[in-house]
Image: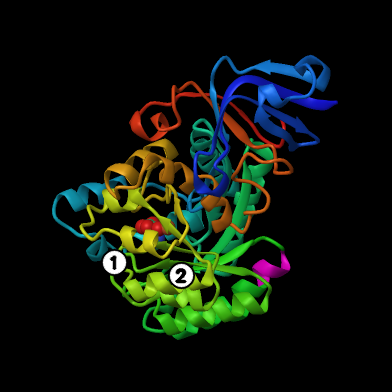
Amino acid sequence: MWDALWINASLATMRDGRYSSIEDGVLAVANGRIAYVGPRADLPIAPERAASFVHDARGAWITPGLVDCHTHLVYGGSRAREFEMRLEGASYEDIARSGGGILSTMRATRDAAVADLLASARIRLDRLAAEGVTTCEIKSGYGLNCDTELKQLRVARALEASANVAIRTTLLAAHALPPEFSGRPDEYVALVTEEIIPAAARAGLADAVDAFCEHIAFTPEQTARVFEAARAHGLNVKLHADQLSDLGGAALAAHHHALSADHLEYTSEAGVAALARAGTVAVLLPGAFYFLREKQLPPIEALRRHHVPIAISTDCNPGSSPTTSILLMLNMACTLFRLTPEEALAGTTIHAARALGLAEDRGVLAVGRRADFALWAVASPGELAYAMGANPLVSVVRGGR
Ligand code: NIG
Ligand code: FE
């Protein structure tokens, strides 16, 4: 006997990154894992005899639970004022160089009490969960000192117990140069590699290490040092690469066998080829592209030609992508980047799971995978990307519950 089973559903299994649909399908779970996926006609016995609970999906589409593989959703303060400044003519880089931007969120995050960080992040995470997100990655990067970076990671981990979402944490201490190290970036990188990474690894608080490789952040050489320290502590790496200029970030990430390289607006064909060889996932962030009014599109055609898996994420953060809607990101991935709705859904399921090193565990509807899935009141899975601003979620199952 299985624990539960869903009938009267259409299944978008997302195997091989395609819908790989099953009409009139059955999905069964046992012990928190998917125990059966297939057409009802192939079920050998009556549903009531196969599982303790039989749920009628009433014609809903079932997809894997959505995976938001790139967020910065634990932070203090707000940057609504900077949005206004940008509309008055300042650029994102101008604001960053004048001590605003990431540094203004750093000050608010350093000052914030743990309970307040938890409460504000919980609201954002609940909004993602309300759109079918069952796994969410959360980065630090607004502490920029050991105590506050670890505080952010602890808050991120604590969210897992309170919200119905699985959390993966990423240490992003190399996000910006904190003011106390002004003019001494290499000394800050030494703090990151010699103190912050070892402390996060010792405390078991980080699943991966990320960095921001950019003119307004860290050089490729400094990024490489961060990656070497991460590897020495047994941690995977990821990179904010080629967002505002081409510093060869994608190739650098690939060289270090990064799980993912993210943003990629300025990535060259050589960078794309390097990602393909390394099996690194390209994470595209249409919310940041939209909100910063970027003009340079990521190299979609090259990513397709080189068969680089493409993930899509919210990049939920106060400065460049203050969104908590993964469904809007599906739409924007299609309208702004010209992905197909099928590619966009693959980008928030199978490929997003891979970007977190979870490819074997979730992101597709297949026997043995974690029973994370979402039921949607849509007539076809393409409607998830199509109906901008709608939320057709009916219910969500995480770990079989
Ligand atoms: O992913 N690119 C750098 N980091 C964030 C923005 C952070 C911020 O502005 O607070 C991003 O876009
Ligand atoms: Fe980001």
Classified by dominant secondary structure, the portion drawn in magenta counts as helix
Of tags 1 and 2, the one toward the viewer is 2
Residue 172 falls inside the magenta stretch: no
Mark 1 or mark 2, earlier in chain = 1
Is residue 179 among the parts visible in the rendering? no
Tag 1: amino acid: Leu
380 relative to 228 in the view: left or right: left
Residue 201 falls inside the magenta stretch: yes
Measured in 3D between alpha carbons, the distance from the residue under mark 1 to the one under mark 2, in whole angstroms, is 19 Å
Q: Residue at x 57, y 51 (%)?
A: 353
Residue 112 is labelled as none
Q: How is the image coloured?
A: rainbow
Tell me whether circle 1 and circle 2 mark residues in contact (CB < 8 Å).
Answer: no
**Residue 397 sits above or below residue 115 on the image:** above
Tag 2: amino acid: Leu
x and y percentages locating residue 130 in the rendered image: 52, 30
**Residue 142 sits above or below residue 176 on the image:** above
Which picture quadrant has residue 233?
bottom right
Residue underneath mark 1: 244
Which picture quadrant has residue 36?
top right
x and y percentages locating residue 379 in the rendered image: 44, 22
| Quadrant, the N terminus | top right
Residue nearest the viewer, comparing 117 with 316 = 316
- Bounds of the magenta segment: 199-203
Residue underneath mark 2: 275
User: Most extreme residue toward the left, as rendered?
Assistant: 89
Q: Residue at x 76, y 37 (%)?
A: 32
Q: Residue at x 28, y 71 (%)?
A: 245
